[in-house]
Amino acid sequence: MPTVAAKTFRSARTGNFNESVIREMSRLAVAHGAVNLAQGFPDFAAPVNLKQAAVDAINADHNQYPITWGTKPFRDAIARKYARTYGIEVDPQTEITVCCGATEGMIASLLAICDPGDEVVVFEPFYENYHPDTLLCGATRKLVTLHAPDWMFDPAELRAAFSARTKAIIINTPNNPTGKVFTREELTFIAELCQEFDALAITDEIYEHITFDGEQHIPIMTLPGMRDRTVLINSMSKTFSVTGWRVGWVLASPDLTNTIRKVHDFLTVGAATPLQMAGVMALEQHDAYFQGLSAEYSGRREAAISMLEGAGFRCFNPHGAYYVMTDISAFGAKNDVAFAKYLVENIGVAAVPGSSFYSRPELGANQLRFCFCKKYETLQAAGEKLAKLGRG
Ligand code: GLN
C-alpha cells in the first residue's frame, strides 16, 4: 500500500490541449476507407533521384548518429541553398540546426527562447501545432486575426498585440491553413514592430516554393534589421514530398543557435543520418525543380477548387501552400466537426474541421480545410464522393 497521497500522473502543462485533429482525421480516413484530403502529405511518389540518394547513403554506411545539429555536408548544402535563392549568408558551423522536421524546429526554438509568462504573437487561424507548442513552454499566446476572405490583418490590432513582454511572433508564410502569402509591406510592418518591441520573428517557411498568381515568398530574415532577429524554420517535407522523413532545419544567429542546439540535442539527438545525406543532393537540384513546384501545384489547386465548388463548397482561393479553406454554411450542418465526421463516415472524404485552427471552436464552425497535394485521380475520386452531397 502507498504511504503517500495519490498523485496525478499528468503534468499541468499538458492539460490544455488535445491530440492533433489533423492527425486524427488521417486515422479516421484509414478506418473508414475514405479519400484523405485532411493531413497535408502527397500521395504521389517522391523524386526518383532523391529516393536513390537515400538508398545509396544507407548502403554507404551513413547509418550512425549524425553530429547532433546536422551532418556537415547537409548543413553546407543548406547554406548554399539560402545563398543561392535569397542571398542569405548563413554560417553552417554556427547558425544551422538540423532537426526532426519543422515540427521539432518550432518546439525546440520556442523552448529555447520562451520562459513562462513570455508572450508570443500568433496569427489566427493558425497551424494547429503552435497552440500546444506555446503551452508546452509556458508562453502566453496573443492572437491576431487574419480576416477572410483575403486573410488580411488589421495593423492596429497587430500593434496592440505587442508589448514589453513579447518574445516573438510566429509567421507562417505561405500560410497553412489560409494560403495567404505575406506581402513585403506586411512583413516590413511586422519587422518594424519586432525591432520596436525587441522581439524575434520565428518563421515557418515550409511552403516557400509553393506560391501562385505571381506571389513570391519573402523570408522576413532578408528585411532590414531582421538578419539576427529571425529564427527561420524549414524542412524537406513539402518541397521534396517526403513528409515522413522528418528532416528539417533552423537558421538563427550564433547565440540563438547555441541555445536551440542544446534543446534539440536533448529532445531528439538528431535527424536520420542517411536522409540528411540524401538531402544534400535534394537541395542541389536545379532551379527548375524548385520553380516547377508552383506550376505543378497550381494545376492541382485548380482541380481541387473546381471539384469543391462543384460540390457546393465556397472556396477561399489560396495564393500559396497546398490547402483550400472552405465555407460550409450552405450545407446547414450543426458545425464543422459534425460535418467532417459525416463526410468521413458517410461520404468517404476526410477533411480537417476549421475549429482546429482557431482558439475558440465557434470561430471555425463554418469552415473545413481540404488539402490538394494529391494525385489528380485522388482529387477526382473525392469529387465523385462529394457529389453525393447533392449541392452541386
Ligand atoms: N502540415 C500538415 C497539415 O497541416 C501536417 C503536418 C503534420 O501532421 N506533422 O496537414
Image (cartoon, rainbow, N blue to C red):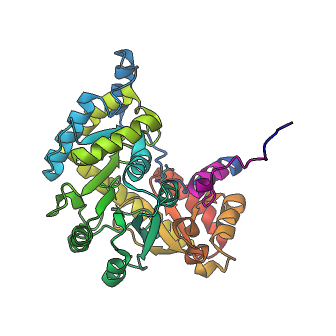
Quadrant of the snapshot with the N terminus: top right
Q: Position of residue 28 (x, y in %)?
A: 67, 52
Residue range (magenta)? 5-29
Decide if residue 218 is in sight here: no
- Please report the residue visible at 34 percent of the width from the left and 31 percent of the height from the top: 276
Q: Is residue 32 inside the magenta stretch?
A: no
**Which one is nearer the viewer's eye here, 248 or 310?**
248
Where does residue 270 sit, x and y in percent of width and height? 40, 32
Does 12 appear in magenta? yes
Q: Is residue 166 left or right of residue 266?
A: left
- Nearer the observer, 376 or 363: 363
Residue in the picture at 28% in, 68% down = 213
Q: Is residue 125 above or below residue 91?
A: below
Q: Quadrant of the C terminus?
A: bottom right
| Residue at x-position 35% and y-position 20% | 56
Q: Quadrant of residue 95?
A: top left
